[in-house]
Structure formats: C-alpha cells, structure tokens
Amino acid sequence: MALTKNIRCLDAVALISSYLDGGLGWRERRRLEHHLAGCPACTAYLDQLRVTVASTSTLTPEDVPSDVLDGLLDVFEKFHRDQD
Amino acid sequence: MDDAALLQRVVAGDASAFRELVVRYHPTLVKVARYYVGSAATAEDVAQDTWIAVMKGAASFEGRSSFKTWLLRILVNRARKTGTREHRQIPTDPVDPRQAQRFDERGMWREAPAPFTDVIDGRLSSAPLLAAVRAAISELPEPQQAVVTLRDVEGLSTEEVADLLDLSVANVRVILHRGRSKVRDAVESTVRGGE
Ligand SMILES: [Zn+2]
C-alpha cells in the first residue's frame, strides 16, 4: 500500500466530520478509510460523531417567547386589516 | 403542512399559518442573526423585522428557492446591514487545539473513545440526550453556532451554508468539525452520566 500513506489518529479525527458529509477528495477519503480499517478507536469516534449529527437533526424548535409571538401576530392582523 | 402551503395561507391573511412559520423558524433566525450583530437583543430585533418583511413580501415569493432559503436570505441581508460586530478570525486549521489534547505526541489517542450506538441505541431522541445537544449548541461560539444550526438542525447543504454566510466551503467544513466535536463532547458526558 505504498500509495496510501498512513495518517495519525489526530489527523484522521480532523477528517471525520467532512467524511460524514461526503466532502473529502478521493485521496483524503482513501487515506481515512485505510486508517479506519485498522483503528477501532477512530472507528468508534466516527460512530460517535454520526450519532451526534443524527441527534442534532431531530431537534425541534425552541419555544418562541409568547410576547414575541403575540407582538408579531398583532402586526400581522393589523397589516391584513389595513389591506382590506 | 409544508412551508410553501403555509406561505400561501399567509398571503391570504391566515394568522395561524403565519404563527406556525414563526414557531418553526424564529429560534434559528435569532441564532443566525447573532453571527452578524453585537447583542442578543439586536439579533431578536433583526429576526422580528424579518418576519414583518416576510408578511409584507409573501405575495412576491416566486418559489425559485425553498421558503427556508428565501427566509434566511432576507434575514442575512438585514443582519448584515445592522451588523456592527467585528468578525472574529475564521479558523482554517482542521486540527482543533482543544481536541489535540486528547492525543499523545505521536498523534495517538490517549484514551480510546467507545461507540455511542451500543449505549444509546433506541435512546437517540431521548429527552436528556436532546436537551444536552440543544444546550451544547446554544453554548457554541459564533460562527460555530450559526453553522451547526443551519447545517445539522435545519439540514441546509454545506454549499448553501457557505453561500448564505459568505464563507468558503472549506471554512464551513472546519467550523462544522469544531462545532460538532463540542456537541459530541456533550453527548459523551450524557452517555457516561447515564451509565
Ligand atoms: Zn485512529
């Protein structure tokens, strides 16, 4: 595997976020996959980051303060009243 | 109901449809505005002004982009005009100095991480876990908070985030890496605390 230079865990971890997004060039992707194949620790880190991103994507919006919501709805009703 | 259908109702004067859009996106607008402006109060003002612009401009939405992209574009344009914050240095080094401490001088893990999947499988959306993720995101410094929110919470592509925030794709990737790794830390604390 002379073409695939081995990278350190420190460097592998820096690539994992972009790897999840499909954002690595082929050379980097190859290097990372080569490293992951022989490194359970970085493979575990990949799993951790994947779970983290999946959890983040399930977040529902925080509550909007009721005074903000009421204020915007007042403006909305007034705007449409004036249109008529 | 999807965003486009709600917007059509907004055009017709349906207040409950407008309310639903505000509930969906207001927190994200405030977070993204915070990237440009100096205070939380100003970010809130910019987000509210954006809704007024949306209500007045709803009829002119042509559907060439998604509602979400259109909305965020209005917000960013307003926030930029308002923004007085000096932009901090955008990190370009993919190796996070905070993270580097977890490795020895040969770049090997000092303590090997363990997979989350075994521990929290089936609890992926458990309340304490999501609360930890939410708290971790709200503590991220800018631009990490805006980038993680747009990419991972709202599901925009990396390219869309870069375009919206006027950053390079490479910068977005580095910022995302740093932000996600902090959120990961928070998940790990929750997982360990729950064992
Ligand atoms: Zn490794």
Image (spheres, rainbow, N blue to C red):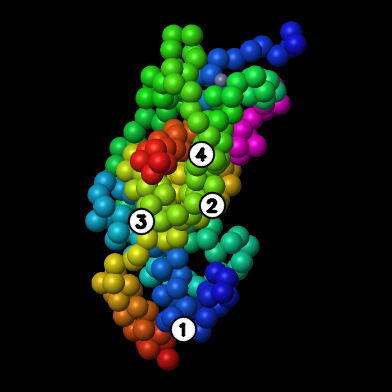
Give the Cα separation between the discs numbered 4 and 3: 31 Å
Q: Which residue is mark 4?
A: B116
Disc 2 marks a residue whose amino acid type is Gly
Q: Secondary structure at mark 1?
A: loop
Give the Cα separation between the discs numbered 2 and 3: 32 Å
Chain letter, disc 3 residue: B
Q: Where residue B122 is drawn, which disc sits there?
A: 2
Residue A64, percent from left and from top: 34, 66
| B1 and B67: which is toward the camera | B1
Q: Quadrant of residue A63?
A: bottom left
Disc 1 marks a residue whose amino acid type is Asp
> Does the CB distance between marks 2 and 1 fall below 8 Å?
no
| Quadrant placement of the N terminus of chain B | bottom right
Left or right of B91 on screen, residue A19: right
Q: Earlier in the sequence, mark 1 or mark 3?
A: 1
Q: Where residue B14 is drawn, which disc sits there?
A: 1
Q: Which residue is mark 3?
A: B30
> Does the CB distance between marks 2 and 3 fall below 8 Å?
no
Disc 3 marks a residue whose amino acid type is Val
Asked if residue A38 is among those painted magenta in the image, a careful observer would answer no
